[in-house]
Image: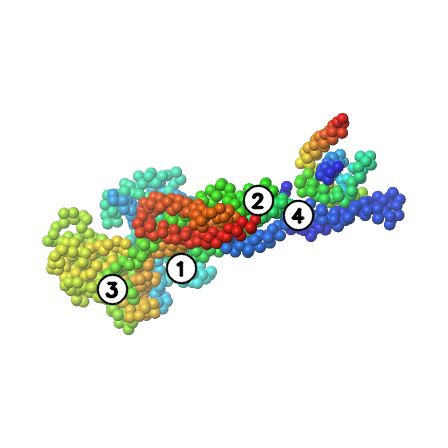
Amino acid sequence: MAKNDLQGTLDLLVLKTLAQMGELHGYGIVLHIQRASEELLRVEEGSLYPALHRMEQSGWIASQWAHTVTNRKAKYYKLTPRGRHQLQRAEESFDQLVKGVRTMLRYA
Amino acid sequence: MSIFRRMTNLLHRSRLDRDIHAELQAHIELRIEHNLAAGMSPEKARRDALVRFGNRTATREHVTSADAALLISSIGSDIRYAIRQLVKNPGFALAAILSLALGIGATVSVFSVIYGVLLHPFPYANVARLANLSLSDPRGNIFDAGFTGQQFRELRNVHAFEGIATWDSQHLTVTGHDVPENAIAFFGIGETFVTLGVPPLLGRNLGPSDSPEGQEPLPVVMLHYRFWQRHFHGDPAVIGKTLELNHRPYTIVGVTRPHFTWGWGADVYLPEEAAQGGGVVVRLRPGVSLAAANAELQPMLERFAQERPHSFPPKFKVDIRPLTFETTRNMGGTLYLLFAAVAMLLMIGCSNVSILLLARGTARRHEFALRSAVGASSLRIVRQLLTESLLLAFTGTGLGIVMAYQLLQLLVAWMPSGMFPPDVAIRINVPVLLFTAGLALLSSVLFGLVPALQMAKPDIGQVMQTSTSRTAGSVRGKRLHSGLVAAQIALTLVLLTAAGAAVRGFLHLLNVPLGYDPRNVVSAGIPLQENTYTTWEARVNYFEQLRASVSALPDVVSASIAHNATPPHSGSEQRFELRDKPSSSPESQTARVHFVDSGYFSTLQVPLLQGRTWSAGEVAHGARLVVVNQTLARRYYPNGDIAGHVIRVSALQASPPDWLTAPGADDWMQVIGVVGDSLNDGLDHPVRPAIFAPYSTLLPRGTQILIRTRVVPEPVLYSIRKQLATVSPDQQTYGVIADLEKWIRDEPEWARGRLISALFAGFSVAALFLSGVGLYSVLSYSVAQRTNEFGIRMALGATRRHVLRIATASAGVSVGIGIAIGLVLSLGMNHIVASRVGITTSHPLIVLGVSLLLLVVAGVACLVPARKVLSIDPIIALRSE
C-alpha cells in the first residue's frame, strides 16, 4: 500500500479502537489493534504518536494524563464527537477503497 | 482547528516538549513491564521495547511538529523573514507605514477634538434634556434670556422644567494678598448643581439649602478645579478653609471636578444672588419637547419683558436651544471641515497602502511561484504575506498613535479661545482609535492578501517556464491599481484646493490694513465692584487717577481710558441721528459708538485727518463733542464738511448704579474732528461708521486702559498691576493683561483661519506626498514587470518614445481622471464649504495652481520609472530570460 493510504488507515484504526474501547493510552491502542486484528496488523509503535497528536490538533480525539493500573502516569486518549463523525467518514471511504481494490483484482 | 490552542502550545513550548517526552517514555516503560511479565530478562525486555518503538528522537520531532509547527511555531521565523523583506525595500516599507500613520494620527486627533468640543463638552447627567433658555428676534438673532432673582424663582415653577441651572457671573477680587487677584464668580447657584447632577471632586456641592428661602445665603463658596489648582496649588485640605472675596470671608465647602464646564471659565460659585441677574439652563421633563416648553414659557416671558423692557429684544420668541447649540455654531463648521480633510487623508493613506501592497505582491509572483514549486503550501504563502501586512499595519498604527498625541497637542494649543468652554476634556478618543486602527489593519490585510489569493492555486509550471513575472499583470489587477490611483489624485486635489483657499483667506486676514498699530499696546481690563463709585464725578475721578498712575510708569509711553474700544472689535452698534440730514430709515442708521479719552488715538496711532480731538478738560467734563471716523464722514458728508455738524446717539441712558451718564449725554453733540479708519467690526468685515465720544459721557461699571509701552509689554505688566493697586489696594485687573496683537490672534476668524489653513496645508502636503508615492510605486512596478515586453517591442522596432508612451499611458489616464473628478468635487463642495466656514474654493487661480502642482508631482513620480524605460537595452532585456 502507498504511504498515504497507510496513514489514512492508521487514523481509522486508532479512531475505531477508541470507539470500541473508550479511553486508552498509546500503548493500549497498539495492543488493542494487534489483539483485535488477531495479530494480523502490527503498528510500528513510534509512528503512532505523531498521528495521535495530529488527530488531537484536528479535534478528533482528546487527551488527559491519568494513572495506569500499575500506577504509571500515561496520557489517555478518547474520541470526541467530531472524531466520531470522522470515524464514520473514514470507515465509508475505507469500504469504498476495499471494494474498489477487490473489484479491480477480480477483473479478468 | 483551535488556533488558540496552537498559540498556547507555542507559549508553552518547553512544557510541551517535556510532555511529549514523558508520554513516549511511558509507552516504552509500559512495553518493558509487559515484556517482563511475559518472562523476558530485564535487559532483553528493554532492548525489545526500544526496537519496537523505533527511532525515538525522530518520533519526538514528528510529534512536536504535529502539535505546533503546523501553523504557529514557525511564526517567529515568518516575522523575521517579513522584517528582512521590509528592510530590503525600505522605501516601500516607509511609504506604507507613513501612509497609515498619517491617516490614523490625523483622524484620531481631529475626532478627539470633535468629541471633546462638539459631541460631549458638558459632563452633566442626562445632558440631552438640558437646554439653554434663549430668545430669537424676527431677524433670526439669538439671545440668551436674562433674569433676576424673583424671576428665577418663578421659572422654577414652570411645568415643562424638571429643574433649572442659573448662570450669572461677575468679577470679584480675591483680597488678602499683595496683588489683588481677579476671580470670575457665578452667583445665585441655588439648585444649579442638583440640576446638572455632577458630583464634586472634594467636599460637597452647593445646593438650595445654602440659600434658604427668606434668609441670608450662607457665606460659603465652591471652587472650580482650575482655581483650586491656581490659587491653592491643589491643596487637598482646602475644605473648611476661608477664601476672602471683596473683603468678605467665605468658607470653602467643595471643589468641582477638573472638566466641569459650568460657566465657561468660572473660578468660584456662590449661593448669594447678584443684583443684575443672568441666564438659565433648564432640564426639560422627560417627554417634553422644545416647542412645548417654548409655548408654555412665552406668556411668562412676555410679562417679564413688560417689567424689564431693556432685558428683552423687541418682538422676541422663546427659542430654547440644546446645550450644545452654541459650541456647535461656533466650532461645528471648522471642526467638521477638518474632519472631512482627515477622513480624506485616511482614505488616501489606506488606498496608498493597498496600492503598495498590490504592486509589490504582483511583483513577487515569481518568488511565490518558486516557493510553491519547491514545496511551500499555499497556506504557507498566504501566511507569509499576512505576516508582512500585519507587521506593516501594526507599525503604522503604532506610529499613528504617537502622531495622534502630538497632533492633538498642537490642535488644542491652536483652537480659537472663547468659542467653547475652556475646561472641556479633550483627550484621545479610544473607540475612534480602535476604529481607524481596524480600518488600517483591514485595508492592509485585504490588499496584502489579494496577490496571495491569486497565487493560492498558481499554475506554477506556467509561471516558472514562461517567466510570467515580466509581462503585464492581469487586467483586473491593473484596473484596481488605476482606480485607486485616480481616487487618490482626486482626493488630493480636493484637499489641495481647500488648503489653497484656506491659506489665501488667512493671508488675506494677515494683510488686512488695521488702521492702528497693535505693537507694544496692552489692554488692561478694570472691573469695578458692585455699588462702588456710584456718582458720576467719583467714577470719572477714579478712572482718571488709575490712568494717570499707569502713565507715570517710566516704561509707559501713554495710557488712555477706553471703555469698549479695544480693536479689532470696538464700540457698540447704536442708532444715531444727524440733525441736518434726517434719515429715511432711522432704524438702520447705526454706527459703532466708542467712549474714549483724547489720548486714545495717539496710543493706538490712529491718525487725526481733520479738525481736533478733545482737551483733557473737555473729557473730564463730558463735553458734548464727538469725533467720527472717515467712513462715517465720507458716507454722510462726501464733501468733507462734517466738522461742525451735530449728531445724537439717543440710546445713551443711565441706569444707576451700574451705568452713569454725563448730563445731557443723549443730547445733540457737535462733530469736532475726523480720524482715520481702524478696524471695529473684526478682521474680516469692512470698517463700520464710528462715533467717538468722551468716555465720561457714559460710565459703565468698569473700563479698560490701553497702554503703549516703550519696550515689549510683558516685563511691564507686573508693575502696571502694582501701580493700579497703589490707587486702590483692591483694584484688580481681568485675569490676563493682553497685548493687542494677542487680541488679534484671539479673534475667532484669525484663530480659525490659522487652524484650518495650517492643518489643511499640512494634510494636503501629506496627501500630495502619499499620492506621489502611490503613483511612483504603481508605475515603477509595472515598468519592472514589463521590462521584457518593452525589450521585445524595441527589438521589433518600437522607438523609445513609443515605449515610454505605452509605459506611462495608464498612469496618465489615472491622473487625468483623478484630476477631473477632483475638480468636479472641489467645485461641487465649494458651496458647502463656503457656507460653513466662509472660505471659497473656486478661485480660478487656486484651482489652476493646485492642478498644475499635482501634474508636476505626478510628472516627478513618473520620472524615475520613465528613465528606467528609456534605459532598457533590448538585448539585455531579452537575454534576461
Q: CA distance from mark 2 to mark 4?
A: 34 Å
Q: Is residue B523 left or right of residue B388?
A: left
Residue B686, image x and y in percent?
A: 24, 54
Q: Earlier in the sequence, mark 2 or mark 4?
A: 4
Q: Secondary structure at mark 2?
A: helix
Identify the residue position indicated by label 2 in the image: B466
Identify the residue position indicated by label 4 in the image: B69
Q: Is residue B276 left or right of residue B190?
A: left
Foreground label between 4 and 1: 4
Q: Is residue A86 left or right of residue B432?
A: right
> Do the residues at pointers 3 and 4 share their chain?
yes
- Judge whether B830 appears above or below A11 on screen: below
Foreground label between 2 and 1: 2
The label shown at residue B604 is 3
Q: How many marks?
A: 4
Residue that extends furthest to the top in the rendered view of this protein: A108
Q: Chain of mark 3?
A: B
Residue name at image x 71 percent, y 30 percent: A96
Q: CA distance from mark 2 to mark 1?
A: 77 Å
